[in-house]
Amino acid sequence: MLIITIIFLKLLILVTHQQQYKVRFQLTPFGIEFQYGNINDLYSNRLNVPSITRCAMICSMEKICQTFDYDASSHVCRLFSIWADQGTFVPSTSSTSRVGYVQQTIELYSLYQKSCNISHDINRYLSCTDDGLWTCQTGQVYNGTVCQYKDIYSYTTVSYEQECRQNQTMQWNGTHCLPAITNSFRWNASGITVAGTTAVSDCSPQRLNQPSGVIVDSDGTIYVSDQYNHRIQKWIRGATNGITVAGQANCTAGSGAAFLLVPQGAVVDSNANLYVADIWNHRVQLWPNGAYFGITIAGTGVNGSSNDQLNFPFDVARDPNSGTLYISDSWNHRVMSYIVNASSGTVVAGGNGPGTSNIQLNYPIGIYLDLPSNSLFIANYNSNNIVRWVLGASSWTLIAGSSTGVNGTSSTLLYGPFDVTVDFMGNVYVADTLNHRIQFFLAGSLNGTTIAGVTGTFGSDSFHFYYSYALALDSQLNLYVADYLNYRVQKFLLY
């Protein structure tokens, strides 16, 4: 049964300055570097790059970059214009070296042979032809699922295959020896309080009252959905007090334009305008930067199930290119899309009543818009799972948790997940709320790892949560968690 007071705020994080170039990478184990055949394949050699995350971000922002390697000892980031299967992964003399390479998936080529506009459409994986159709890049051919180079070097000798299979750091995919995908990310298990005061709740600017969401922008500013203070608080990096940027600083609730009533999910755009899911007012408010009131852009203020109404909207995501909003219409068991200036929305996921079948949602809470795969990741609260719904599809695919709605505490199960986000490598992070933990799922894996919190145990020290409601990542993949009944936001450093 849905617990009405369990609510949350979701982050739509921009990991690159150009979302069209957002890219997912797979990482090799340590001790590997990339060997290339032509000196021109190495197009950039960056020095003093502080982390592999920064190296990956540099590569992700440059369309020409398909592969990189990074040495954590020398802080050298090498960028290559060729794909991983055009070179070779070889042992490195440095034990801290590893390779990152673009992950090719079917979804990234879903636009193949569909219409495009050569004057302005940009895509990392496809090229727009003079005929106005998306096609493979020069030198590549479409194999029915992805674009690959014509001269892919396949290893077919039995001895090579056996050698690959015997190497525990590599895996044989039928034609190639590729690095085994491993989770080498680690976060400090002890959180740092960056907003609020542990176990203390009131309306003062340094306090929070059941924070249900968190956003971190590119300069480290934190936005907190201060749920039962009915406001959104902005915390500049290092500040001890928050600044009210939506709702009333005196914590007054209401239904007028200047008020919020249990605000939940929010998105901040590049101009610091806020889009807030005002859950108990059954609406989404656009709160312009510096404004004292909001503008209703979705919902009527009265709950209902028609396409111009919402019924407890818990979250909102926004396409930065088109401005289209996606709203988690929780009690209607659907996700709605609203184009700019629309007075009503369109059902893009669910809408078939509550249930566990793959055409239904069951109290969807957090949503994450993944532009590269043209899909929504949805925290399907009452079904205890995370699902991915490709926009335009009629059903979802399972990402994490049980497909039949079973809850649990094991590494493959979830219990009342409220939030989900995805990093630039396709790894999935879940606020497993009723298990008081954050789960990390390597891209493509259904087996999660607890990276913060203690499974099934709540507490108020730096290692515990009292309901982990929402999560966000900053540009360095540091983790932020809205710790609901501890009245604080915790930061967990990546190391």
Image (cartoon, rainbow, N blue to C red):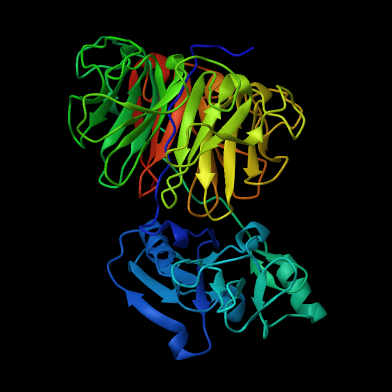
Q: Can you see residue 14?
A: yes
Compare residues 203 and 44 and report the one nearer the observer: 203
Q: Position of residue 449 (x, y in %)?
A: 57, 38
Q: Is residue 353 left or right of residue 436?
A: right
Count up the numbered dots.
0
Figure quadrant of the N terminus: top right
The image quadrant that residue 463 belongs to is: top left
Compare residues 429 and 316 and report the one nearer the observer: 316
Q: Is residue 163 left or right of residue 90?
A: right
What residue is drawn where x is 49% and y is 90%? 38
What residue is drawn where x is 38% and y is 47%? 495
Q: Is residue 323 left or right of residue 83?
A: left
Compare residues 131 and 142 and report the one nearer the observer: 131
Query: Does 345 appear above or below 232?
Result: below
Q: Position of residue 82 (x, y in %)?
A: 52, 79
The image quadrant that residue 59 belongs to is: bottom left
Q: Position of residue 164 (x, y in %)?
A: 71, 70
Q: Can you see residue 191?
A: no
Q: Position of residue 438 (x, y in %)?
A: 51, 32
Query: Does 139 appear above or below 405?
Result: below
The image quadrant that residue 146 belongs to is: bottom right
Q: Residue furthest right?
A: 158
What residue is drawn where x is 51% and y is 44%? 369
Compare residues 224 and 307 and report the one nearer the observer: 307
